[in-house]
Image: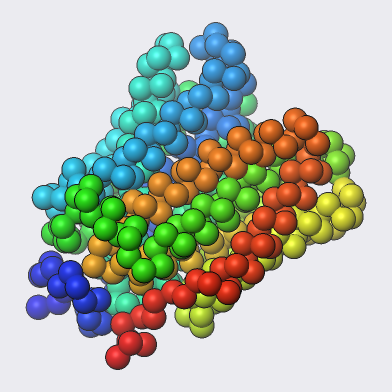
Amino acid sequence: MSDLQSGTPPTQTQPQAPRQAPAAWAAVISMTLGVFGLVTAEFLPVSLLTPMAADLQVSEGLAGQAISATAFLALITSLLIATLTRRFDRRNVLLSFSVLLVISSIIVATADNFAFLLLGRVLLGIALGGFWTMSAATIMRLVPENHVPRALAIMFSGVSAATVFAAPVGSFLGDIISWRAVFLLAAGIGVITFIVQFATLPSLPPRGRASLRTLVDLINRPGMKFGLFSLVIIITGHFALFTYVRPFLENVTGVATAGVSGVLLGFGIANFIGTHLAGALIARSLRMTIALMPLIMGLATLGMVMINGALNPTIVLVAIWGMAFGGVPVAWSTWITRTVPDEAESGGGLVVAGFQTAIASGAVIGGLVVDHVGALGVFSLGGIVLVISAVVVTAVLRPAPTVSEQA
């Protein structure tokens, strides 16, 4: 019987043997839908902040905490979910996250005060952190080992699609049908996701020995500390830039508000392309991919600084930056599946925690730099950090080979 069908746990001291079961691509698509729905709901407030604040009679700054609350709960959940659900079939756990997406979106859409809206965002944070933690480990069980990078690239294309949808499309629809109706559409996406996952996800009995102690043990494994530290630095550099890309485009490049949406749409489309290119690059060399992506991102943003806001080159460089970033989540998710294949869920939780920490750190550090030296300063600093991190990763990081490479 295949590994996917039997759910027989591998030994905890040896990597999993190569799998011969056919790839469950329909289930991979259902995971992609989950990514799209959760990330869309996460970032919808970015494009709907003004009408949300006005309707709930709170400041835009307070309304923005709807995003912070989601990120905070996602961070906590990413560290605890593998332990709390270690006895449950992963299929049922993943389906519960889709249910939470539906419930949270309905709560936000019907909220008559900010506290009720915050409740919905907290539920979304639980679903988001839990889903991301289990995503890479689930993909490992849905497809044979040599197809994992491709499957991860397909799943992460949901992030790129959500990037395109949540900002420009969310804002456009919000003006036509109201921000509450947009969140009801997000609930509809959750319903569709649940149906597709229910129909395609196989039974996935729990594996490993997930516990809080497991997280400590994983961090102490060879290469984990440096890898996680490198991940946090790279993502911090990216979000220090991305959080303040609008001030850069408006104040340095001189792009009008409508133009900003167009440039960001280009970023999202390029990000989608980069996500799929990453699968092919990882098949050649994971180490090269991990190092190449931040190098391209850093050089692109430094190029934006050196041309001092020239419009057309800036549009091209933003697209290059977006395409390079598309490969970052795919590469690091592949890294964790190779580094700790026997505890991929707990390892995925550490990666998600690193991402959430870096998102918050990038926003705070970037804000301090912007306040003191402006948008050009933060893009200069962020670009330098990304280039240096690429050089250091190239010199030090040694990703584990695949099982077939070890044989």
Q: Which residue is depicted at the point 62% across and 51% down? A: 238
Task: From the viewer's perspective, tell me whether residue 208 is left or right of residue 307.
Answer: left
Task: From the viewer's perspective, tell me whether residue 367 is left or right of residue 218.
Answer: right
Residues 162 and 309: in front is 309
Q: Which x, y percent locates residue 296?
A: 69, 65
Q: Which residue is depicted at the point 15% across and 50% down? A: 86
Does residue 355 lie above or below 55 as drawn?
below
Does residue 217 lie above or below 22 as drawn?
above
Residue 203, can we see it?
no
- The quarter of the rendered structure image containing the C terminus is bottom left
Residues 301 and 203: in front is 301
Residue 173 sits in which quadrant?
A: top right
Does residue 9 lie above or below 158 as drawn?
below
Residues 154 and 351: in front is 351
Task: From the viewer's perspective, tell me whether residue 99 is left or right of residue 85.
Answer: right
Does residue 228 lie above or below 360 as drawn?
below
